[in-house]
Amino acid sequence: MKFSLSILFCITIVFGFSQINDTVISEYNNEIVTKLTDTLSPEFYKVRYNESDLLYKITDNYGNNFEDLYGTRNMRPILHGVAYRGGGNNYYHKTAKRKNQNPLPNDGVLNLCQEGFSTSVYLYQKNADSIIDNQGCNCTNGSTNNLNYVQLDYFDSNHIYQMVKMAYESAKYDSIGPIYLHCWNGWHASGYISAILLKQFCGYTNLEATSYWDIATDGANKSSRYRSIRDKIENFVPYPEFKLEDELGNRICPPMPSVIDSSKIHLEIQHLSLVPEAIPVNYRLILYEIQFASGKTTFSSPSTNQDLIHLKDALRKDSDLIVEIGGHTDRSGNEAKNKVLSQKRAKYVYDYLIKEGISSSQLRYKGYGSSYPAFSNKYKSGRASNRRIEVKIIQKRDYGTGTLVNESAHEDILLKLENIKYDEFKINQSYIMTNLNFESGKSELTDSNNKDLTGLLLFLNSNPNVTIEIGGFTDNSGMKEKNDTISQLRAQSVHSFLIQKGIATEKLDYIGYGSKNPISSNQQKWGRDKNRRIEIKIISK
């Protein structure tokens, strides 16, 4: 039965996404064609994925549970057979692991294609140029489906409109497969768009939509920075042109679960590595993977302990991060001895981190004895769990308050002139003026107080023997000849600014490179914006 259903499913994809061939259709009677149309229906996907409610996970945090969708992570329904949310399984992938901040791995894209999805939407900009364009796949009957994989910004109102329109069209026409809206973990950005879709198509109130967003972050919602996101959800006004009739809305809208298991909604140490912006200062994280035997102050194999691996990763990523290692005991024995015991447990972890190269300036340690039990001491299992290590966040990087994920915080730090000592300058090294941007087709400087221009001026005045080349660049829009001219004019505008500010002409050269050497993808608007830039090259010093 599974095999025959799979064949029907694949044939349906071909009809839904390629031009219908009358000769092919004539080979099937009307009854079969009707069944084929139904296979992309909300009912089909609801049964196939066993979709019980909005919090039901088709794939879990590690990308498991549904092999045909491996490569996705924390995948959940938003609208039955219409829209799904989740992340990309890069961090926990069984093979070819890569950093979390990436689009879907190849098998995730292929599996979505084979499952009949019409579109996958990557909600972040970082590494979007590695997206696989228009993934084609073979079905079991030899036919093909094309999955359109695009990057759209969760914070851009025009892009939100496009996503709502995609969901509307998938809801209206069973021949159009579902869309998969994904971020990195399947918590914040995908949850934000999901809350908007629930307001648009399922009549969710502001309270219902924001509560859904909070619950579906799996506990990673504690930081005060998310207040602005709740405001954005509340401020969203459904588009009247995409209103569905009640009958269809009832057909596609999953319920919230009647009982929510709050024990599964909590933060763990992996969150500090994966989504540090979600963890508030003074929050305490239990290292569940660390186990101390009764009366012991050490444990075996700290180098392979997953909680310590996550903690080291977080400390190395954020040099501003300062944590307290807290040791705890159960209530057995004398409290004075428990204090000493807990102190030694904390010191053991502290010493291990120092040995691994973590700076002592990022670490504190303290023993709390049995004063703060996290579990009941009545039972043996509870006492074992209370012999634990907790990590308290004392200080961390400020990730801002206006976005779900501050992607720039995860970017490699760009070279900036004001941050480099004179002895560290390298001849022919280029420095990108990251804050100086140009409108498409324009070469004029619109902000003479731009901090990059001010920094460049300060740098040249402080280093009178340095000579530089000012390089102008464009995106790849338009004709090559025009791009060459515009890039030259952009470089010249910076050159003229410096001359007006008193910099000697012999210290400056300028050249236009056109659309050569892009630093970002020209497929997306944000990438083209980055490519319209100025670079400063050190010629001599």
Image: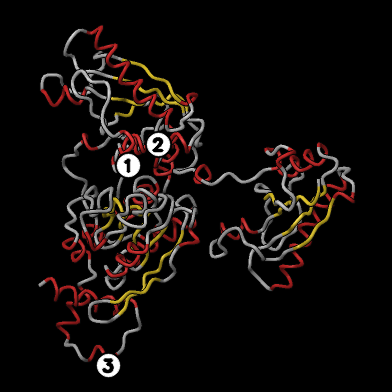
The percent coordinates of residue 98 (x first, y second) are 40, 53
Q: Tell me if mark 2 has few (under 14), some (14-19) or many (20+) residues whose alpha carbon lies within 10 angstroms of its own.
A: many
Residue placed under numbered mark 3 in the picture:
23
Label 3 packing within 10 angstroms: few (<14), some (14-19), many (20+) = few
- Placement of the N terminus among the 4 image quadrants: bottom left
Is 352 drawn above or below residue 105 in the view shown?
above
Q: How many marks?
A: 3
Q: Nearer the viewer, residue 154 or 150?
A: 150
Amino acid found under the numbered disc labelled 1: Thr
Amino acid type, callout 2: Ala
Q: Say what secondary structure mark 1 lies in.
A: loop
In screen coordinates, is 34 left or right of 196?
left
In the picture shown, does residue 186 fall above or below 355?
below
Q: What is the quadrant of residue 4 in the picture?
A: bottom left
Element type where label 2 sits in the image: helix
Answer whether labels 3 and 1 touch (C-beta < 8 Å): no
Q: Name which residue type carries label 3.
A: Thr
Q: Nearer the viewer, residue 249 or 138?
A: 138
Between the C-alphas of marks 3 and 1, the distance is 49 Å
Quadrant of the rendered image containing residue 367:
top left
